[in-house]
Image (cartoon, rainbow, N blue to C red):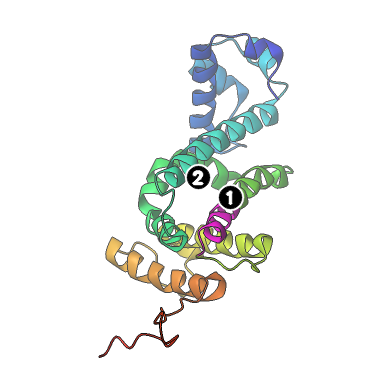
Amino acid sequence: MPSETFFRLNEEKRTNITRCATNAFAANGFTGTSMDSVAEAAGVAKGALYRYFTNKKDLFLHVVDALREDTQEYITEFLEKRRGQDVFNTMKDWLVSSYITQERLSTHRKVLCNVLYQESVDFKGEVLAKFGKLSTHYVKLMLQQGIANGTIREDVNLDAAAFIVQCVEDRFHDATTMPFLDMGYSLYNQPQAVIEHKADKIVEIFRRAFGKEKTEPRDNQSGQRNDRSK
């Protein structure tokens, strides 16, 4: 947690320090980044940086919080543009946005992947908790909207469904750019048309698992279903 001294800095200085730290952690990982190198890149004295942050872990978790806030803004904007849309179409939009999302959040991914997959640190759980809760929160909001507009069944367990959807969407995005996470679905480095085709198959599974069955309209007078073939 940054000190009060850090928050008394003007916004430009705070942003500059955060950006320089983010770039350093993305390029060199946690273990390969030093407080000295961040201080030099940001144009501040090393002693001053230690007045702002207790240690390198404190600085890193501040970066993670900043990346989390940026990710939250991105997801909020993404969903806001699709307010009122069929929730399953929104799920597909999120799946097929893989390359765009990867590019927009590329620095975020580098910072997180360095720590989670390539380094041995004792605070991985803290990092995962920050982003895991964020993803689940927004997936649950999508499902709640689906219940409200009648596309998702009311008896669906939101916690379980959000967990399943989040896991699939996270792995789908990861598999498009990381071959070691592409477990048999052939997503890695595929063209957009293939990504969309494979997303359709996954969304259809979601629809069958959580969606309401569509009922055919009935004739008002006879009570019989309309025969559209006549």
Where 212 falls versus 68 (above or below)?
below
Classify the position of the N terminus by image quarter. Answer: top right
Question: Closer to the camera, 182 or 50?
Answer: 182
- Which amino acid type corresponds to the residue marked 1 in the rendered image? Ser
Furthest residue toward bottom? 230
Residue positioned 68% across, 10% down in the render? 5
- How many marks the image carries: the answer is 2
Who comes first in sequence, dot 1 or dot 2?
Answer: 2
The answer to which image quadrant residue 164 occupies is bottom right
- Which amino acid type corresponds to the residue marked 2 in the rendered image? Arg
Q: Secondary structure at mark 2?
A: helix
* Neighbours of disc 1 within 10 Å: few (<14), some (14-19), many (20+): many
> Magenta includes 55?
no
Residue positioned 27% across, 89% down in the render? 229
Q: Which mark is residue 109?
A: 2
Segment tinted magenta in the rendering: 138-150
Question: Closer to the camera, 18 or 33?
Answer: 18
Magenta stretch, overall SS: helix
Q: Quick check: marks 1 and 2 in contact, CB under 8 Å?
A: no
Classify the position of the C terminus by image quarter. Answer: bottom left
- Tell me the CA gap for discs 1 and 2: 14 Å
**What residue did someone put label 1 on?**
135
Q: Position of residue 66 (x, y in %)?
A: 57, 31
Q: Secondary structure at mark 1?
A: helix
Residue positioned 57% across, 37% down in the render? 68
Question: Is any atom of residue 127 visible in this view?
Answer: yes
Where 33 falls versus 45 (above or below)?
below
